[in-house]
Image: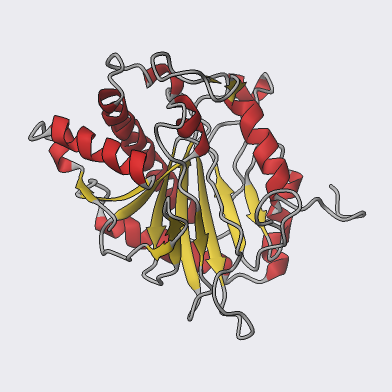
């Protein structure tokens, strides 16, 4: 059964050690847990889903200029079938998405220097969309940094060990919309999916369908618990922990009614070196820079633009 952790136990000082121990247990066993009392205003959670639904309801001609395949920094709209399942040879997914990164100005030194994935967001012409998503992105950055402090405690790392790795992270807020497919039953894809970064926070619109595969290979449903966020361990945190933590294999079932999700991918700074931490046994992974790892995984995810669809 999925654990539900109370974030207030950590930030209030009521039981930070107990919270960290429960988090560690969840990350070691199934790689997933749910978080309540996370401090994100309920009104903002509703606004995120409402604004996402408003965007996805736009005509395709209004969304096409924001195509993510025009971006070199993982920002913009991925239309139906642009994302693939299970890597480069996977099948196109019947969903659309919209990705938002750290909101930077054109004169930001990181943009001018051409740093990896440092670019400008693209914004649709929707009422309040930009303000809502920027507010939610800021809230989720704080939440991600807070949970990494609990990870430090669980792994017996020095305080603030992860702080320099998440000072300016490659975090992405990705909204997604999956319509009802009358011809589809069961999972959208049989191939388990893995997230790339440290932690992923999933906000649901109430339409169930997220499943995680346990260590015995059995798929089980993640309940849609009101006012909670589902948190998944990603591949980079698994690599950091030298497989002590488990990146959660997951999939989505075909929805019985249209589904809108907001997933916040909490990835480290682009220059962070992801290497197994000392004291956790023989390294199972070679060191890799976070930006390089993200680039490889994104190239496996999106279908290329067809000839004639370039800028």
Looking at the picture, tell me which residue is in the foreground, 57 or 287. 287
Q: How is the image coloured?
A: secondary structure
**In this rendering, is residue 15 above or below 99?**
above
Q: Image quarter for residue 160?
A: top left
Tell whether 181 sits left or right of 282. Answer: right
The residue at the point 50 percent across, 51 percent down is 249
Residue 51 in sight = no
- Looking at the image, the residue that sits furthest to the bottom is 182
- Looking at the image, the residue that sits furthest to the front is 216
The residue at the point 31 percent across, 24 percent down is 155
Residue 300, percent from left and from top: 71, 45
**In this rendering, is residue 56 above or below 31?**
below
The residue at the point 63 percent across, 31 percent down is 293
Residue 111, percent from left and from top: 64, 25
Residue 236, percent from left and from top: 51, 32
Q: Image quarter for residue 84?
A: bottom right
Tell whether 15 sits left or right of 259. Answer: left
- Looking at the image, the residue that sits furthest to the right is 307
Quarter holding the N terminus?
A: bottom left
Residue 161 in sight = yes
Looking at the picture, tell me which residue is in the foreground, 301 or 77. 301
Looking at the picture, tell me which residue is in the foreground, 23 or 213. 213
The residue at the point 29 percent across, 13 percent down is 158
Tell whether 207 sits left or right of 227. Answer: right
How many dots with numbers? 0
């Amino acid at each position: 059964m999925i654990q539900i952790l109370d974030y207030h136990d950590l930030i209030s000082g009521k039981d930070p050690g107990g919270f960290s121990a429960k988090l560690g247990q969840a990350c070691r066993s199934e790689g997933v847990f749910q978080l309540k009392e996370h401090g994100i205003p309920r009104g903002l959670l509703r606004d995120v889903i409402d604004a996402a639904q408003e965007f996805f309801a736009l005509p395709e001609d209004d969304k096409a200029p924001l195509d993510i395949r025009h971006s070199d920094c993982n920002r913009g709209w991925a239309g139906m079938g642009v994302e693939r399942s299970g890597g480069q040879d996977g099948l196109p997914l019947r969903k659309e998405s919209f990705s938002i990164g750290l909101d930077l100005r054109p004169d930001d030194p990181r943009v001018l220097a051409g740093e990896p994935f440092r670019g400008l967001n693209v914004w649709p012409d929707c009422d309040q969309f930009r303000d809502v998503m920027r507010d939610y992105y800021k809230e989720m950055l704080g939440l991600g940094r807070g949970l990494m402090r609990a990870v430090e405690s669980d792994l017996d790392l020095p305080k603030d060990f992860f702080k320099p790795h998440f000072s300016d992270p490659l975090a992405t807020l990705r909204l997604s919309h999956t319509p009802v497919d009358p011809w589809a039953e069961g999972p959208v894809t049989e191939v388990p999916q893995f997230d790339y970064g440290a932690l992923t926070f999933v906000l649901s619109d109430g339409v169930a369908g997220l499943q995680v595969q346990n260590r015995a290979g059995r798929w089980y449903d993640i309940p849609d618990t009101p006012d909670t966020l589902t948190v998944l361990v990603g591949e980079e945190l698994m690599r950091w922990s030298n497989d002590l933590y488990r990146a959660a294999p997951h999939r989505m079932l075909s929805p019985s009614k249209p589904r809108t999700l907001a997933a916040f991918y909490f990835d480290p700074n682009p220059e962070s070196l992801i290497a197994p931490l000392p004291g956790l046994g023989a390294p199972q992974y070679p060191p890799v820079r976070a930006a390089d790892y993200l680039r490889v995984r994104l190239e496996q995810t999106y279908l290329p633009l067809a000839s004639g669809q370039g800028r």
